[in-house]
Image (cartoon, rainbow, N blue to C red):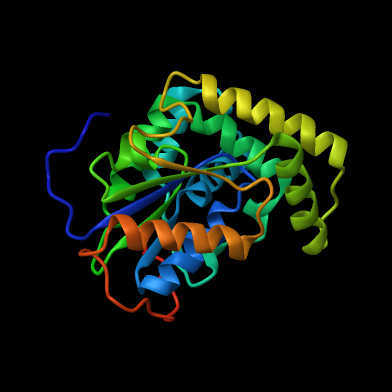
Amino acid sequence: MSGPAEALPAPVITLDGPSGTGKGTIAGRLAAMLGWHVLDTGALYRCVGLAAVRRGVALDDDTALGALAAGLSIRFDGERVLLDGLDVSTDIRTAAAGEHASRVAAQPAVRRALWRLQRDAVRPPGLIADGRDMGTVVFPEALLKLYLDASPDVRAQRRYKQLKDKGMDANLEILARELAERDRRDRERAASPLTPAPGAVVIDTSELGIDAVLERVSTTVRRMLPNALPGTLSTAQPERPSN
C-alpha cells in the first residue's frame, strides 16, 4: 500500500490510537458535532477476526485471511454492524474479538484487502476515520490528524468498565495482560505499525474524561481548520458509511 493518487471526494479527519483511549466515542461525538460521517475501522478488523474463527481460518495465515477479508460484506446500519447480512454488533465487542482483530490486523494481506474499502467510505460532507493507521497509511492526505493515547493501566480499567457495563464477563488482570500484548503486536508489526502520523496532534487522555477530551479535540479542529468547517458546529447525529 502506498499513498493514493486519486483525490478524496470529501475532507477527512483521522483519529488514531490504541484501545481504551476513548477514540471511538470521540469520533462519534465529533462527527455528530460537524454533521459528518464516521468510520469505525476497528469494527472491520473485528469482523475479519470473527469470520476467520467461525470458518476455521488460522489467524496467522496471511494468504487465506486476505482472501477471506476481500470476500466479506461488512455494512454499518446505525449502531449495528452487519457481517454478510448478519448482525454481529455484540459478537465483535468481546475481549476475545479484540484479540482476534489484533492478530488478523498484523497480516499485510488483510490490510491490503480493507484499504480500498476504507478509502471508499469517504463521502460528503466529510469523514471522521477512527483506527490505528488512518493518518499514516489509509489517509495520509487527511485535513487533520489526531492521535489519542493513555497509560496502559488507565486503558485496562476503561476496557474493564466498558465490558462490565455491557454485562460481559471480564477479569482486569487478564485484560491488562492482553492489552499489553496487543500494544506490542500493534506497534511492532511490519504492516502499518501503530504510531502517530507525522504532524499529528497527540492528546493524552489518561487524566481526562470524555467531555474534556472532546473539548480539546473540538478546540483543535476550530483552531487548525478555521476555513474548512462550518462556523457553528452542528448537533446532528453522525452517519456511518455503508461499506
In the picture, measured across the screen, residue 1 lies left or right of residue 54, that is left
Which of the image's four quarters has the C terminus?
bottom left
Q: Looking at the image, how many numbered discs can be counted on the residues?
A: 0
Q: Foreground: 160 or 84?
A: 160
* Up-down relation of residue 127 to residue 112 (above or below): below
Q: Residue furthest front?
A: 223
Seen from the viewer's position, the closer of residues 61 and 146 is: 146
Question: In the rendered view, would you say 199 is above or below 181?
Answer: below
- Residue 178 image offset from top left, x and y in percent: 74, 32
Q: For residue 37, what is the image quadrant? A: bottom left
**Identity of the residue furthest to the left in this view:** 6
Residue at position x 28%, y 49% in the image: 119
Rendering coords of residue 182 (x, y %): 64, 30
At which x and y percent is residue 198?
34, 32
Q: Quadrant of residue 114?
A: top left
Residue at 40 percent across and 56 percent down: it is 220
Q: Nearer the viewer, residue 209 or 8?
A: 209
User: Residue at 32% across / 40% down in the picture?
Assistant: 138
Residue at 17%, 59% (x, y): give it. Answer: 9
Q: Is residue 41 left or right of residue 137?
A: right
Q: Is residue 85 in view from this perspective?
A: no
| Residue 38 seen anywhere in this rendered image of the structure | yes
The percent coordinates of residue 51 (x first, y second) are 56, 44
Q: Quadrant of the N terminus?
A: top left
